[in-house]
Image (cartoon, helix red, strand yellow):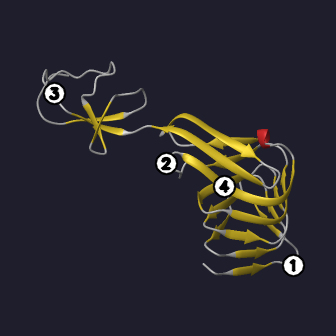
Amino acid sequence: SNATLNATQGLTVSGGAHLRAINNSTVTADVLVGSKGVLDIAGDSTVNGDITVSGGVLQYESGCLRVEGTLTLDGACSFDVSNIKKEGLYTLMIYDGLVGNIDQLEVVYGSSVRTQAELISTDSGLMLSIEGFSRVLNWRSGATGTWQNDGVTTWNYDSTTSTYADGDAVSFTGGGTV
């Protein structure tokens, strides 16, 4: 963290290479994320220059990447957000301009997202809205001891009575009939 990388000729990240932007780090260069390259956003950081993603991967862990220049999306690219584990609205990047269309970004999210993950482009940034994470539910046998998934509250999630929904993982403890 608190590191600065200066590259007068620009940086190319491709062929399986990773550039990891961590807390309070600064990259002073134009960055090209080419085929099989990964730009990993792992904390609030800044790129003083343009970023071009051309067949590469943007990977989000935490924080926000400030691009003091233009974000260019060129061809098929992906944005891996599988490290996000909570519902919410996340600001992933702030930039001075966007060339290309966010529809070119394939959103890759983990199997824990049950309903929706949507990239949102604004005039100055890229945000992500996530709704519907699966949960790990603990079954409580209840009065009948029979497992039910038809809206009854024989489940606990974070010590709160809950109902089962498709996509939830379950844990069976105690007696009863399954």
Q: Looking at numbered disc 2 in the image, what kind of residue is underneath it?
A: Lys
Locate residue 126, reporting x and y percent. Answer: 73, 51
**2 vs 1, front mark:** 2
Q: Secondary structure at mark 3?
A: loop
Which element type, helix, strand or loop, lies under badge 2? Answer: loop
From where the camera sits, is residue 14 visible?
no
Q: Is residue 140 visible?
A: yes
Q: Are marks 2 and 4 in contact (CB under 8 Å)?
A: no
Mark 1 and mark 4: Cα distance apart in space: 29 Å
Q: Which residue is mark 2?
A: 86
Instruction: Please tell me whether mark 1 or mark 4 is closer to you in this view.
Output: 4
Name which residue lies at 66% across and 81% down: 3
Disc 3 marks which residue? 142
Q: Is residue 178 above or below residue 70?
A: above
Circle nearer the N terminus (4, 3): 4
The image shows residue 25, relative to residue 108, as above or below, that is: below
Image coordinates of residue 87 in percent, x first then y, are 52, 45
Residue 85 relative to residue 141: left or right: right
Tell me which numbered mark, 1 or 3, is placed earlier along the sequence.
Answer: 1
Which residue corresponds to mark 1? 8
